[in-house]
Image (cartoon, coloured by chain):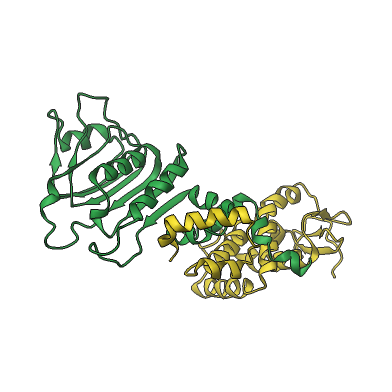
Chain colours: A yellow, B green
Amino acid sequence: MAAPESGDGNNGAARMVTLISSDNTRFEVEAAAASLSQTLQLTILDGGGGGGDGIPLPNVDSATLSKVLEYCIKHAPAAANGGAPNATAVDRAELERFDNEFVNIDQSVLYSLIMAAHNLEIEGLQSLVAKKVADMIKGKSPMEIRRTLGFPDPTPEEQAEMNAHMLEYGWAYE
Amino acid sequence: MEAAGDLDRISALPDDLLYIILDYLPDVTVAARTAVLSRRWRRICINARCLALSETTEMTCATAPCRFAEFVDWVLAQRGDDDVESLHISMRRPKCASVERVNEWIRYAMQHVVESSKLYMPPYCSVNDYEQQQEAVVLPSHGAATSIWMDLRRYRLQLPAISGAVVRYEKLTTLSLSVSSFVEVGGFTLGDFVSTSCPRLRKLKIEC
């Protein structure tokens, strides 16, 4: 891993920041990538996260954080260009391909990711995962959704309420 | 993370995130499939920022009584007085909702929808069903939406009467009305309505 860049990084090497996961793993990443997080952006603008300090993220474990950073690193150049203006169709297609593959993961990781994206305010990532979860729901029956999303068994009280609701509005769930 | 604990993770997501997920499931009849799974999801679905209620059944007028209108009533009643960003109601079988019911929906929409309000009802069920088209639905005197789209060619549309409250559609920029004809009350014409009640109107489409 490269030595932390303490200066502004105006010449050559990009400025790096260090993020520390809940399980105390340190991640060194370009400031531009970490700044996709609205939450981190201000700290970084204030000069935080450089040198040996690091920014602690007590709500994000290392497995999730490494995934989050994978997304940020891939999306940082496009974000720096203000998104669309300079992006070619090829670039956009490549990002789309990346996104599709990126969310093709275990559901438990999806939920951790969307929570992290929410806490860190990374809008693009949050939308990406939300859309994926919605796609898992589309066109499925209640029982299939229950299986897909791994819902817990309802309490007897909830079951009775659901049955009553189904009797009345069951057609909507066909 | 333990595997067993992961199963219920979606239920552990905060409401904000469930709303964001639902933004990608705009049709409440799809979203409602998740609603039956738990009380919390049902509450979330009903209170989503955008509501699209569309009748998906392929059944014709003659078969099975339509529950769709009841479902719409139920959803709107559950929401109570909260504003909604957009409300789209689309029916397939017009006979299943009475003119009173359609009026209730229009009233609700004009009062609570802040952005886009859409209401669609097919003109008739079958060729034998032309006669009833003289019934009129009523446009309330106030509307909060920026966009109103009504395709109700089954009905006439009664414009608000000038004798009542001042007619204001303050934020309306897009208006599209397809009805069988207009009913003007107390000398307040469609032209008056468009030119005096809708100061921000930019797009207008009238079909009758």
Which part of the image, by quadrant, shows the C terminus of chain A?
bottom left
- Image quarter of residue A111: bottom right
Q: Name, please, the residue furthest toward the right.
A: A52
Residue B62 higher or lower than A105, as above or below: above
The image position of residue A82, as x and y in percent, is 56, 58
- Image quarter of residue B156: top left
Q: Residue at x 40, y 39 (%)?
A: B112
Q: Is residue B25 left or right of residue A40?
A: left
- Image quarter of residue A132: bottom right
Residue A61 higher or lower than B178, as above or below: below
Which part of the image, by quadrant, shows the N terminus of chain A?
bottom right
Visible residue check, residue A65? yes
Residue B36 higher or lower than B74, as above or below: below
Q: Nearer the viewer, residue A170 or B30?
A: A170
Number of residue marks = 0
The image position of residue A79, as x and y in percent, is 60, 61
Q: Is residue A56 left or right of residue B43?
A: right
The image position of residue A119, as x and y in percent, is 69, 52
Q: Is residue A43 left or right of residue B141?
A: right
Visible residue check, residue A36? no
Q: Nearer the viewer, residue A32 or B82?
A: B82
Q: Residue at x 29, y 66 (%)?
A: B59
Q: Nearer the viewer, residue B201 or B34?
A: B34
The image position of residue B66, as x and y in percent, is 31, 57
